[in-house]
Image: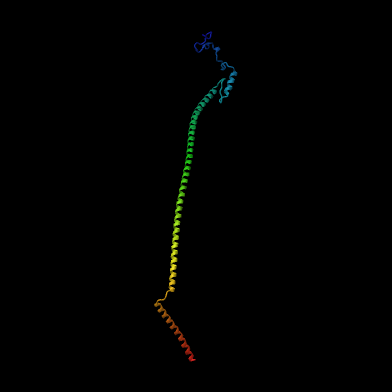
């Protein structure tokens, strides 16, 4: 039996007194608009139309509308799962990419530092080698200069000795020739020379006498 007067809830309890009234006075109206004016629902629909999907907020729903909503829900859930996995993967990728870039930067810095160290090493080595080469050339040049000086001195000494020898030999030969010219003949040489001269004179006289004899005989015969 319906109560004639609505009782206020006590201690915040839910008030259900109006639900016991006659069905002709139900709060849900046959047009499913809950008693709201159509202008209110139109505004609500315009707001819903701003969403990226089609959603009905009032009016009658068909099975096709429900099936479409279910498909959209499944698609959205699938997309949500995919986007969740995609977001996780992208997050992992970005973190890994940052680590890769970080390590690449570290390698680049190490390479640059190694290049500087290599250049420093080459500079020090080049300077050291140049100094050592300079010392080596000075030593070798000094040694060769000293040897050349010694060789020159030796050559000069040898040439002086040879010149002295040649001069001494020439003087000896000249002295020997002079002594030979001025040398007086020995008795043997004088005797030999006298005999040679005597034989020469006799030969000449014989040749002269033979000629006269032949001439005289010819004259006598004539």
For residue 143, above or below residue 173: above
Q: Is residue 35 left or right of residue 217?
A: right
Side (left or right) of 39 relative to 144: right
Report whether 82 appears left or right of 187. right
Q: Nearer the viewer, residue 90 or 122?
A: 122
Q: Residue 23, image x and y in percent? A: 54, 12
Residue 102, above or below 183:
above
Outermost residue, right side: 39
Q: Residue furthest bottom?
A: 221
Picture coordinates of residue 32, whole percent (x, y): 56, 17
Observer-nearest of 182 and 70: 182
- The quarter of the picture where residue 22 lies is top right
Q: Is residue 220 above or below residue 102?
A: below
Which one is in front, 40 or 8?
8
Q: Which residue corresponds to the image point at 44% horizontal and 68% vertical from the top-left?
A: 171
Quarter of image, res 161 = bottom left
Figure coloring:
rainbow
Residue 145 pos. (x, y %): 46, 55
In the displayed structure, 176 sits above or below 159; it is below
Q: Residue at x 45, y 62 (%)?
A: 160
Number of numbered tags placed on the structure image? 0
State the residue at coordinates (59%, 20%): 43
Could you tell me residue 37's position as x and y percent?
A: 59, 17
Residue lying at 45% horizontally and 53% vertically, measured from the top left? 142
Indicate left or right for 205 with 26 as reference. left
Residue furthest out toward the top:
4
């Amino acid at each position: 039996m319906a109560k004639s007067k609505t009782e206020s809830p006590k201690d915040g309890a839910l008030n259900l007194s109006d639900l016991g009234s006659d069905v002709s006075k139900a709060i849900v109206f046959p047009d499913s608009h809950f008693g709201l004016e159509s202008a209110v629902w139109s505004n609500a629909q315009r707001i819903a139309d701003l969403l990226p999907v089609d959603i009905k907020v009032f009016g009658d729903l068909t099975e096709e509308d429900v099936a479409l909503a279910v498909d959209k829900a499944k698609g959205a859930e699938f997309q949500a799962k995919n986007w969740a996995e995609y977001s996780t993967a992208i997050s992992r990728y970005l973190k890994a990419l940052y680590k890769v870039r970080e390590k690449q930067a570290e390698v680049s810095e190490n390479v640059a530092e190694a290049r500087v160290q290599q250049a420093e090493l080459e500079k020090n080595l080049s300077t050291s080698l140049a100094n050592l080469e300079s010392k080596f050339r000075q030593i070798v040049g000094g040694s060769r200069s000293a040897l050349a000086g010694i060789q020159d001195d030796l050559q000069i000494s040898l040439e002086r000795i040879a010149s002295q020898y040649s001069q001494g030999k020439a003087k000896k030969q000249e002295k020997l020739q002079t002594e030979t010219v001025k040398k007086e003949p020995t008795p043997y040489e004088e005797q030999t020379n006298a005999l040679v001269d005597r034989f020469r004179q006799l030969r000449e006289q014989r040749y002269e006498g033979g000629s006269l004899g032949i001439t005289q005989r010819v004259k006598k015969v004539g």
